[in-house]
Image (cartoon, rainbow, N blue to C red):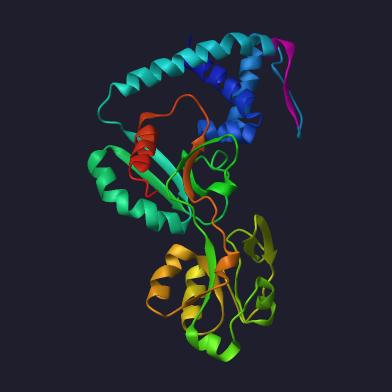
Amino acid sequence: MRGSEFARLRAFAAVVEEQNFARAAARLRIAPPTLSQMIRELEEALGVRLLNRTTRSLSLTAPGQKLLVRLKPAMAEMQAAMEDAASLSDKPAGLVKLHTPAQPCAMLIEPLLGAFHAAYPDIVLDITVDDAVTNIVEGGFDAGIRIGELLEQDMVAIRLTGDMRQIAVAAPAYLARHGVPETPGDLLAHRCINWRPPGRSGIYNWEFGKEGRWFAVAVGGPLLVSHREVALQAALQGVGIAFWSEHILRPYIQAGQLVPLLEEFSPSFPGWHLYYPSQRYLPGAVRAFVDFCRDHAVI
C-alpha cells in the first residue's frame, strides 16, 4: 500500500468517527479542503461513493459501510502496534498542544514546567492560555484544562484539584459604608463588579446554591471587566463587591483586606480537570504529559 492510499483510508476513518469534516481535519491536523480532496480521491480510486454528505448531515453509503467494517480492525491493530513500539522508548519526543485558562495555568502548569522539561527534554509544549471555552478537537489541541461541570461526555478527564467554590467578597471599608448583604437577593441593592467572560458578549451572572438548588443573580454596579484580576484590585480599593474563586481570594481574606460574604450560599463544585479526546491511542509525548500532570495533581 502506498503512503497516499494509507493517508486516504486514515482520513476516511477519521471522518466517520468524528461525523464532521472540520473536527476530523483538526484531529489529523490538515486543512478541511485537503481532507475533502483526500476523500474524493479515495472514492475515485475505488469507483464508488463512500459518504453521503450535506451541509448538515453525514452518513455512510453501502460501500462505505462495507469498507469501514474491514478497515476498523486493521486501523486498530496498526494503532496498537504503534503504541507498543512507542512504549519501548524511554525518551518520548514530539509536540503537545495544550489549551488552558489563565487560572489553572498559573496554579497547575507553570509550577511544573521546570520539572517536566528536565524529565522530558525532547517534548515541546505549545500552551495556549485562553479563558474562552474552546472545542479542543476543532482547535487542533491534544488536551485542555477545564472545570468538571463543563467537560463533554466524550472526553477522558483526569482530576487535577479538589472541589472548588466561588465566593463574594468586599473590603471592610465598602461594608462600613454600604452594609453587609445577608442573601444573594440583597446584592441587587449593592455596587457589584461585573465580569464578561472572554469570547462572550453577555455578562456573567453570579451563581449561588442552597440545599442542592443552584440559581443565578444578575448583579449591577459601577465596573465591568473582562479580567477578574481587575475586579480583585477594584474590590481591594473599596469599589464594590467581587465574585471569584475562594482559593485565590483566601490570602486577602486572611490578611483582613477582604471579607467573605454569603458563604452559606456558596457550595462547592468539581475542580480543574485535564482532559483529552477519548481514543485508544495517544502519542507518546501526550501520554507522558498526561501522566506527569496526574502524578503532580494537587487533590
Asked if residue 166 is positioned above or below residue 271 in the image, the reply reads: below
What's the magenta region? 57-64
Toward the bottom, the furthest residue is 177
Q: Residue at left 33%, top 18%?
A: 85
Q: Position of residue 254 (x, y in %)?
A: 39, 74
The residue most toward the left is 118
Q: Is residue 256 left or right of residue 188?
A: left
- Where residue 178 sits, quadrant-wise, is bottom right
Q: Nearer the viewer, residue 288 or 252?
A: 252
Q: Is residue 268 magenta?
A: no
- Which residue is at 67% across, 9% downward? 66
Left or right for 158, reference 90: right
Residue 179 place in picture, x, y as percent: 59, 86
Q: Position of residue 265 (x, y in %)?
A: 60, 65
**Which one is nearer the viewer's eye here, 268 or 20?**
268
In reply to whether residue 63 is colored magenta, the answer given is yes
Tell me if I can see residue 30 in this picture: no
**60 and 211: which is toward the camera:** 211
Is residue 105 visible to the viewer in this orientation of the structure? yes
What number of labels is visible? Answer: 0
Would residue 119 be found to the left or right of residue 144 on screen? Answer: left
Q: Is residue 117 above or below residue 283?
A: below
Q: Residue at x 57, y 63 (%)?
A: 266
Q: Position of residue 260 (x, y in %)?
A: 50, 73
Q: Where is residue 120, by image quadrant?
A: top left
